[in-house]
Image: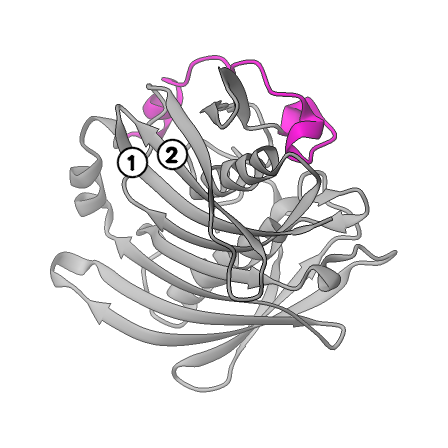
């Protein structure tokens, strides 16, 4: 799970249902410094929960060595906004994880496709399908080239650029804003603050996927021009996103989904090439 702050570890245990299915137990705090806003948990708390759960199971069930590096290829998830209401006490979330496929590759890499269903307090919280890969250090370092050393790559990040107004992106504090203005109504620069204790808990060799998902959430909020709640993300991680060059975030409306819910396509580019895409579905808040 690669968390240096024990307080940011959400997973508290797991149990085996079958060779392909496990339960993971996650504890959500009454309020989280980053993932709780205005008395509600943000949908990315679910994503962080399943990220930690899948990392645990890759080691505990699939015997992937701790030194291997896990990276997402795609994640398609949805949440029930009614189940995100914060309570006066911590809640226990149960993740039912089913591994749809496991493909071992030459030289020690492995590809996984997993389905996750989450419940708490008798409520269906959310569901996700995640495709991800693990690489042994020698192969990962070869893939990352001159960025392989996390501390050196992390140190390349420029000071954070000015944030857009927090209210524009559904935030209270400027420190939690990951977009900077560019002068375009539907375009922003990705704001990278490596001093943020949650998004950058430890040095990374590339900008983490959770930062990109947060940018997609905030861009969809800004593009809608009114308070909304993101309830689904259909996301592809195209390539690694580097610290040493700026990224452009754009948001454009898409046709509503089959339930009539608004959708926004968010794209992040670096050096003129797409590095991340997500279709974000929202409901009025």
232 and 203: which is toward the camera:
232
The reply to whether residue 80 is in sight is yes
Q: Is residue 164 left or right of residue 238?
A: right
Secondary structure beneath dot 2 equals: strand
Residue 240 screen position, x and y as percent:
30, 37
Q: Residue furthest left?
A: 106
Pick whichever of labels 1 and 2 is earlier in the sequence: 2
Residue designated by label 1: 274
Magenta residues, start to end: 149-176
Secondary structure beneath dot 1 equals: strand
Residue 94 screen position, x and y as percent:
63, 71
Residue 234 part of the magenta-drawn span: no
Query: Does residue 160 sit above or below 250 in this rendering?
Result: above
- Give the quadrant of residue 227: top right
264 and 269: which is toward the camera:
264
- Labelled disc at residue 268: 2
Residue 153 part of the magenta-drawn span: yes
> Which residue is at a point 47% across and 52% down the rendered structure image?
255
């Amino acid at each position: 799970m690669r968390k240096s702050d024990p307080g940011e570890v959400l997973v508290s245990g797991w149990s085996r249902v079958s060779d392909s299915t496990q339960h993971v137990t996650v504890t959500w705090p009454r309020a989280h410094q980053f993932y709780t806003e205005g008395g509600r948990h943000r949908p990315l708390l679910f994503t962080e929960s399943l990220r930690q759960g899948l990392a645990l199971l890759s080691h505990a069930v699939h015997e992937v060595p701790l030194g291997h590096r896990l990276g997402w290829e795609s994640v398609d998830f949805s949440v029930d906004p009614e189940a995100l209401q914060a309570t006066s006490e911590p809640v226990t979330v149960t993740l039912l994880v089913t591994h749809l496929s496991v493909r071992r590759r030459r030289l020690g890499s492995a590809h996984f496709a997993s389905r996750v269903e989450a419940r708490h307090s008798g409520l269906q919280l959310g569901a996700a399908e995640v495709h991800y890969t693990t690489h042994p250090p020698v192969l990962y370092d070869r893939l990352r080239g001159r960025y392989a050393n996390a501390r050196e790559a992390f140190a390349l990040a420029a000071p954070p650029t000015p944030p857009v107004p927090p209210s524009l992106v559904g935030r209270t504090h400027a420190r939690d804003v990951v977009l900077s203005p560019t002068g375009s109504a539907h375009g922003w620069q990705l704001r990278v603050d490596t001093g943020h204790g949650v998004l950058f808990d430890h040095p990374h060799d590339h900008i983490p996927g959770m930062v990109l998902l947060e940018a997609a959430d905030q861009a969809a909020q800004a593009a809608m021009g009114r308070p909304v709640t993101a309830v689904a993300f259909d996301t592809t991680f195209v390539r690694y996103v580097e610290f040493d060059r700026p990224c452009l975030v754009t948001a454009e409306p898409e046709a509503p989904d089959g339930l009539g819910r608004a959708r926004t396509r968010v794209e992040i580019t670096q050096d003129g090439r797409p590095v991340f895409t997500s279709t974000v579905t929202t409901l009025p808040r």
